[in-house]
Image: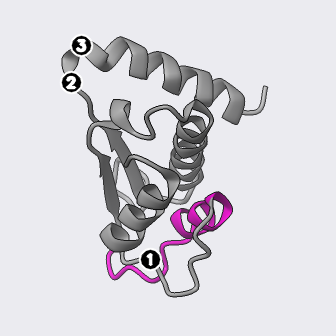
Amino acid sequence: MHDTDAVFQQFYDGLNLPNYFGWNWDALSDCLRDLKWLPVDHYILIVEAADEALPGDAAGRQMLFRTLLRAGQRWSGTQQPVGIDFGRLVVVMSCDATSVPDLQEQLRSCWEDTVPS
């Protein structure tokens, strides 16, 4: 995901986003918080090489991470069926071992900006 257009394209293709997807951060957030067009009850969204997303665009990377965190937060608060231990959307971000501390710090920063005090 080298630029925001590539981010939107990967989500559009990978999740089969609806045709009304608006190709911007608000539209991605809206789609990730709805998911009605997908035919299953639970979703695991894996972002491979999350540490390499949007190189040279720190603000864009923060926006991506905030969007994913908000979507995950939204689904973690929904009513869960008996016997189900996770929300309808689980977001997994992967990276190589040497990048873990930096990715954790970026996510922590985004989380603090996302969660109300």
Report whether 99 appears left or right of 67: left
Query: Residue 17 got which mark?
Result: 1
Residue underneath mark 2 = 96
Magenta part of the chain: 25-41
Residue underneath mark 3 = 98
Residue 12, given in percent of the width and then of the height, sits at: 41, 71
Report whether 117 appears left or right of 60: right
Residue occupying image coordinates x 41% and y 15%: 102
How far is mark 3 from mark 1, CA to CA?
A: 33 Å
Residue 99, given in percent of the width and then of the height, sits at: 30, 18
Residue 113, given in percent of the width and then of the height, sits at: 70, 29
How far is mark 3 from mark 2, CA to CA?
A: 6 Å
Q: Amino acid at mark 1?
A: Leu
Kindly indicate whether the residue at mark 2 contacts the one at mark 1 (C-beta within 8 angstroms). no
Specify which label sits upstream in the sequence, 1 or 2. 1
In the rendered image, residue 32 lying in the magenta stretch gets the answer yes
Specify which label sits upstream in the sequence, 3 or 1. 1
Q: How is the image coloured?
A: one colour
Q: Nearer the viewer, residue 74 or 17?
A: 17
Quarter occupied by residue 9: bottom left
Report whether 15 appears left or right of 73: left
Q: Is residue 117 visible?
A: yes
Query: Residue 51 got which mark?
Result: none
